[in-house]
Image (cartoon, rainbow, N blue to C red):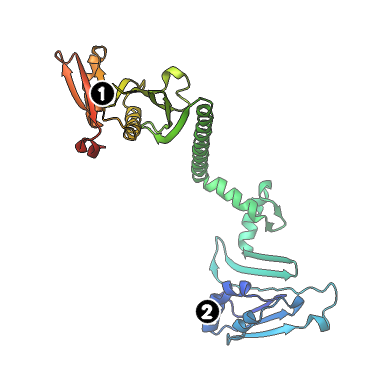
Amino acid sequence: MLRCDQFQISVAFITMGGVTPLLQTLKGLEEKGIKGQILTTNYLNFSEPRALEKLNGLKNITLKMYDVHQNLEVGDMVQERVIRRDTNMSALVGKEKYIEEHDNIPGFRDHDVWISCDECSKIYIGYFKRSSRLGISGERINMGRLKSWILTTFYKNELLAIQKEYERKVKEINYEAQKKTKLIDTVHRVFREPNHVIIGVETNKMGDEVLVVQWIHSNDIWIMLYNDKYKACSNHPRIMATYEKPYGEAEYIHIDDIMVEDKEIGNGSILMEYFLKYCETTPAKYISGSLSSVDSDHFDRSEYYYQKHGFKVEFYEGRKSGSIRYDMNDKKTRNKL
């Protein structure tokens, strides 16, 4: 619009919503001294006084209002047409005209913009007509189909990249949705087990979400991990312990066994952290356990695991067996957690 010699606009009504996007352009035309005329109406009293004041404040614009109650007959329509001047723009062949037209009718609105070059039309319209996909009618081209043809012809690789990224995102969303569905199924499975309580949700080093489940029955203490991979009762990663109350001696908790099939993925650490949290809520003074000679081939790993969680480890008979102990009142032990 900044390239026109003059402009004329007619609209059925004027609102701030319609004026605001044009204000910067209209002020630019005012600075250039390009005069314009704007005709509006009092149709249904839609025009906003504030919007009219904004336009009337521009020195280059003559603003007039058409009284539809006095002169407009039923069926008459108010049209707006803005035709830009021909510009000497460089086209592929010859010179081109930049044309913009508006047709504003109450309840209907069109806004057309196109570039016209007589010399180009002679060469390229004939070429485009040979492609029925472009929707050529006379010398007017269906711009939607033309854009689609340009994109698929000249930007095929870019479109394929966008499509692949879209497909990747869809797969990622589906994967996350499936994970959540499986987790919900696991929750239902836990609720069906008597005395089973979910006390946490954690993610191991493999990125798998696991439910931390507590089962307390009489003196038995079990901390277990549930997810869709661990469905059988025998393969749940778990710590099994017993609360001991010896007569005349301090109460303690004895670790009977720790069963973790998948090594080095963090399940053992998740179990121990929740096990210790529970033990600290009891009157027990310490936690004890034995290192069996059956497990002597991986005593180094066992020693690191227990010491990492604050246990004292002692070996007997040349590291063929041993014991572990965790003192509840040991401040150093607490600080390591």
Circle 1 sits in a helix, a strand or a loop, which is it? loop
Q: Give me the residue at 52% from left, 79% from top.
A: 28
State whether residue 148 appears in this view: yes
Residue extending furthest right?
A: 74
Quadrant where the N terminus is found in the figure? bottom right
Q: Quadrant of residue 50?
A: bottom right
What label sits on residue 28 in the rendered view? 2
Rendered location of residue 55, percent (x, y): 61, 82
Rendered location of residue 174, percent (x, y): 53, 36
Quadrant where the C terminus is found in the figure? top left
Q: Is residue 269 left or right of residue 13?
A: left
Q: Amino acid at mark 2?
A: Gly
Q: Is residue 118 left or right of residue 239?
A: right
Residue 66 position (above or below residue 180):
below
Q: Give me the residue at 79% from left, 73% from top.
A: 77
Q: Is residue 280 left or right of residue 88?
A: left
Residue toward you, 55 or 77: 55
**Which of disc 2 and disc 1 is earlier in sequence?**
2
Q: Amino acid at mark 1?
A: Gly
Asked whether the beta carbons under mark 1 and mark 2 sit within 8 Å of each other, the answer is: no
Residue toward you, 211 or 213: 213
Residue hosting label 1: 248
Residue extending furthest bottom?
A: 59
* Other residues around mark 2 within 10 Å, as few (<14) / some (14–19) / many (≥20): some
Residue extending furthest left?
A: 318
* Other residues around mark 1 within 10 Å, as few (<14) / some (14–19) / many (≥20): few
Q: Give me the residue at 62% from left, 55% from top.
A: 124
Circle 2 sits in a helix, a strand or a loop, which is it? helix
Give the Cα separation between the discs numbered 1 and 2. Answer: 96 Å
Rendered location of residue 93, percent (x, y): 56, 61
Residue extending furthest front?
A: 248
